[in-house]
Amino acid sequence: MTDLTGRRALVTGGASGIGAACARAFADRGASVTVADLNGDAATALADEIGGTAWQVDLSDTAALAETVLDIDILVNNAGIQHVSPIQEFPPEKFSLILRLMLEAPYLLVRAALPGMYERGFGRIINLSSVHGIRASAFKSAYVSAKHGLEGFSKVTALEGGPHGVTSNCVDPAYVRTPLVEKQIADQARVHGIPEEEVVPKIMLTESAVKRLVEPEEVASLVCWLAGPDAGMVTGASYTMDGGWSAR
């Protein structure tokens, strides 16, 4: 198990799903964890459980984030939302919100964390991207755009951070067993014209060679390794955990 004793980690969207799994895994490995989430009660409950700190924050409020300073060793950009709709019906305000939350906010948090990381000569930036960061699916224009942008931003961060001991990588899972995925099922059924019970086998798992959802704890295990000392030469990379989807 990767030893993260003494490290300070911030996980966005940390109160549920992948974020919560990462927060628990970091705490189990000795890190001090800040659970950042829009849902303050959920963030506080998890922080109390793991001996961490809660930060209730609206990451779509990019004006406020521009003034933020972060004194942390590990940043996990995980917070995200989804909206499933054809482009011609996609609400512009929803498209803008998704890009603010999932691309601009990670940039602002990295910007806030880098000075301290550079000063200490150590930093780990881990961006929870998606197989949709390297592949596209219909009806997810904003999400795919944001994740593709995050992949590029992560690589630039890797190039700038390398001389200062800071790594930056993406983790690209397929569909993970989280509330975010569960909330998509009705919308996917609507846009594809199929019953809800057919969405997982016919839409979500159709491209994967391994026919199951990814578990949040599996993602967290990779995130912890990337955060640790053995991953010092791993940067600018995108680690797929997609059951073979991107092998096609």
Image (cartoon, helix red, strand yellow):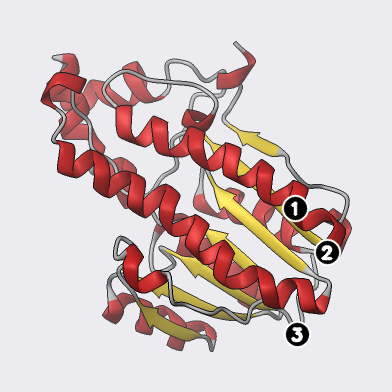
Q: Which residue is mark 1?
A: 160
Q: Which residue is mark 2?
A: 164
For image coordinates 42% across by 83% down, the residue present is 54
Residue 73 in view of the camera: no
For image coordinates 50% across by 22% down, the residue present is 135
Q: Is residue 130 above or below residue 72?
A: above
Asked which secondary structure carries label 1, the reply is: helix
Residue 129 in view of the camera: yes
Q: Is residue 21 left or right of residue 73?
A: left
Which amino acid is tagged 1?
Answer: Glu
Which amino acid is tagged 3?
Answer: Gly
Query: Along the polypeptide, which appears first: circle 3 or circle 2?
Result: 3
Q: Which residue is mark 3?
A: 6
Q: Quadrant of residue 66?
A: bottom left
Callout 1: 10 Å neighbours few (<14), some, many (20+)?
Answer: some
Inter-mark Cα distance, 1 to 2: 8 Å
Depth order, front residue of 94/193: 94
Screen quadrant of the C terminus: top right
Callout 2: 10 Å neighbours few (<14), some, many (20+)?
Answer: some
For image coordinates 67% across by 44% down, the residue present is 156
- The answer to whether marks 1 and 2 mark residues whose Cβ atoms lie closer than 8 Å is yes
